[in-house]
Image (tube, rainbow, N blue to C red):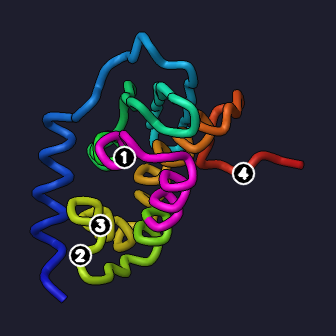
Amino acid sequence: MHDLTDLYQTVILDHNRRPRNYRVLPTANRVGSGNNPLCGDEVTIYVELDGDRIKDVTFQGSGCAISQASASLMTLNLKGRTIPEAEAIAGDVLKLITSGDVKDDEFSDLSALAGVHQFPARIKCATLSWHAALNAVHGEPAPATTEKTSD
């Protein structure tokens, strides 16, 4: 396996400094949001669905470099996908973030998120935008949160 440390640092820093698709999407017909109260990360995901296809996806928010980079990467990888494809990608990425297990560079730049598993306190930062995006495509109005709510 190649050294993910350099990829992790390069990709995360690049997407944090120059986030892709960082804007309100006026044509959005779905919106999801999320917050990570322990870290202070906040994100709003704007999705334009055309049938079951994600025609466009953007985000706005604030937070640490990992949360912003993950949201930027998420928009690039979900745009143009069907909802089932987006769900599969999100599921794979969430496993990648928590396990660090990269298989044959299957995720390209997303594999940089594998480095997050080495920093357990940052896993919630990296997964927040993915949960908010899934809420958006499913029309779930409640904000995604990284904290468990009491039953």
SS state under label 1 = helix
Displayed quadrant of residue 52 = top right
Q: Which residues fall within the magenta stretch?
A: 75-92
* Closest to the observer, 86 or 11: 86
In the picture of the structure, the residue carrying the numbered disc 2 is 105
Check disc 1 and report the residue beneath it: 74
Nearest the eye: 48 or 120: 48
Q: Quadrant of the N terminus?
A: bottom left
Picture coordinates of residue 57, whole percent (x, y): 40, 31
The reply to whether dot 4 and dot 3 touch (C-beta < 8 Å) is no
User: What distance separates the C-alpha of mark 2 from that of mark 3?
Assistant: 5 Å
Considering only order in the chain, which callout, 1 or 3, is on the residue closer to the N terminus? 1
Residue at position x 49%, y 63% in the image:
94
Tell me the CA gap for discs 3 and 1: 11 Å
User: What type is the residue that disc 2 sits on?
Assistant: Asp
Secondary structure under tag 3 reads loop
CA distance for labels 4 and 3: 29 Å
Task: Determine which residue is flagged by label 4.
Answer: 148
Say which element carries label 2.
loop
Q: Main secondary structure of the magenta part?
A: helix
Q: Is residue 149 above or below residue 46?
A: below
First along the sequence among labels 4 and 1: 1
Q: Where 110 sits versus 151, above or below?
A: below
Question: Within 10 angstroms of label 1, few (less than 14), some, or many (20 or more) residues?
Answer: many
